[in-house]
Amino acid sequence: MKKETQANSMDTNEENINNYQFAQDDPSNLMNTIFSNITEGIIIFDSKGKIVDVNPSICITLNRTKEDLIGQTLESLVPKEKQFKIEKQWEILSYKKHVKGHLPIINGESIIDFDFTTSTLVDHQLYVSILRDVTEKLLLEKKVKKNAELYEGLFLEALDAIVFWDNETRVVNANEAACKLFECSLDELINKKLNDFVYKKNAPYYSFIKTLKDTGSVRDETLFLMPNGQKKYVEFTSKLYAVDGYHMSIFRNVSERYQMEQDLRESESRFRSIFEGALEGFVLWNDHFEIVDINPAGEKMINVPKAHIVGRSLKNILSDCEYPQTELHEQIRLLETDGKSSGTINVTLNSGENKHFEFSTKYNVISNLSLTVFKDITEKLELEERLHKSDTLNVIGELAAGIAHEIRNPMTALKGFIQLLEDSVTDKNAMYFDVITTELNRIDSIINEFLILAKPQAIKFVEQDIRVILTETVNLLNAQAMLHNIVFKLDYSDDIPPLFCEPNQLKKVFINIIKNAIEVMDKGGTITVTATTTSDSRIHISIRDEGFGIPEEKIKKLGQPFYTTKDRGTGLGLMVTYRIIEEHKGLIEVESEVGVGTVFHIYLPESN
Ligand code: ADP
Ligand code: MG
């Protein structure tokens, strides 16, 4: 139908154009000035849609010349998919004088959006379209819409509570999250004063109010009291005149975090006080086995200042202590499977002291830190060993009392009969007779030693000068010593008080020790015997030999029943010795160096 209209008006086309040009040539024509200067684009076209004139503005907008545009059809300016708009325009123009709408026009590679108004110039059978470039306006509109959506989204949906308030801190608007935080409905919240929610208006409160006034914004946290009586620790950011002259605050409930922090601080301080105050050593180390902290008790136990140990690798320290690798691997395996492990370690401190530590470790007690607790058990071990020794001594003692008497009686008979047989010994069996006699003597000496272990029959404590006992013992053994090319050197201090003791028993002690000394000095030498007093009122007796010494690990075996390294030894001498010294409430210490010699130190309290 539109096409027909076009076809009908075709005949008059030429004439119309001429008429129109005539009008334009008139310099006084106001329309002409407008046409040339108006910022809106103007396209004049005929009933076939062919462009007959354009104004400079549209040329500039489309970046085309007037000549280029004149003669083109309207359709050619519009992208294919939008051409229906032109058809729609024709349709409306067929019954209306004006059409308004929106039209995209091709501009090289891009499209420019225009709002247009097309009017029919009836007299000329022409049409004029006035076009306004609305690309930017559209973009702006889109942006505004987007911002509005964004704002809606942010404000309404935000998880954080957002509140707008006026100069009196009265709430003018709030989102859902805010209602939730303040534990009331929006209606209840509106017109309430934000200030009234602050739990305590103390120094920090005045400080953040001041910051807000001075700088226009503030970020802080404080305790709020909600209308339902609930207290919440709230973090907030406030900004003055944020939107439409209103002030804005964004709140976040951090009560849980605050509580957690509080709990953490408390448990941290509890841990600290245990850590600092514990009597046991505490070492904290990280997952690289690096020591992070050690408590004062720990420092003291290993006698190394904290500064020297923090940062060091636990593995290095253990390997320095010759802690067995296999043991270390086992410990690590246990930590990884059970989360804990324990054991003991032998450590030689910088001072040369040898210490035993018992330790237990908990893996990852706090954020990648593991805790090892250790304690010095050196003394405990020594005590246990002594206890063990004296326990065995007691048992042996009781046994000895029984057995020794039982054996002694048949022994006396045997010895008597052997003596009777002595006269009838022939050369042929003299050798056997000698063996029998020496072996019988040996049995006899073992029994004698056993008997000393038995509960003392007639032990009588008297006051005696230890130097006298020592000298008497030395005299007793002098002959034997000389046989082995050994001389005695005695060195007593003058100020030794008399000792309350059992002299015969002590003699037995010194005999045992000196006999052992003689037995280890095949090449002869000197046995030095000293007696002094110590600063803590004890009498110190030392017996030093130049024998082959005792290896470190064997020292603790001394005094164990039947421990002997000699072919014909009984391993009872030192046991008896320890027993007697113990009865005197004294102490024996052995100091030895292999190849150099051994010193037996005996400490006896001056008064029992
Ligand atoms: P026995 O002398 O019968 O062997 P003891 O109880 O007297 O038994 O001594 C036990 C062991 O202690 C000895 O066999 C020896 O190995 C060791 N011993 C004791 N005294 C010394 C010493 N002065 N030097 C080296 N070793 C010693
Ligand atoms: Mg001996």
Image: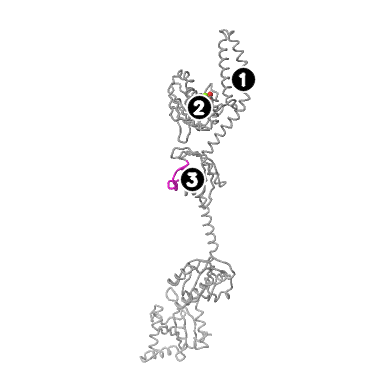
Between tags 3 and 1, which lies in front?
1
Q: Earlier in the sequence, mark 3 or mark 2?
A: 3
Residue 44 location in percent, x, y? Answer: 43, 85
Residue at image mark 2: 464
Ligand 1 within 8 Å, label 2 CB: no
Residue toward you, 373 or 245: 373
Q: Say above or below: 434 vs 536.
A: above
Q: Which residue is drawn at 62% across and 27% down?
A: 399
- Residue located 53% across and 59% down the image: 262
Residue 408 appears at what percent x and percent y? 61, 20
Kindly report which numbered mark, 1 or 2, lies closer to the viewer in this rendering: 2
**Amino acid type, residue under disc 1 in the picture:** Arg
Tell me the element at label 3: helix
Q: Which amino acid does label 3 sit on?
A: Gly
- Callout 2: SS: strand
Q: What is the spatial separation of the Cα atoms under label 3 and label 2, in whole angstroms?
A: 47 Å
Task: Give the CA separation, mark 1 to mark 2.
Answer: 32 Å
Where is the N terminus found, in terms of image quarters?
Answer: bottom right
* On screen, residue 240 above or below 334: below
Is residue 224 visible to the viewer in this orientation of the structure?
yes
Dots 3, 2 in contact, CB < 8 A: no
Tell me the magenta residue range. Answer: 297-318
* Residue corresponding to mark 3: 298
Does the beta carbon at disc 3 come under 8 Å from ligand 1? no
Whether residue 564 is visible here, answered yes or no, is: no
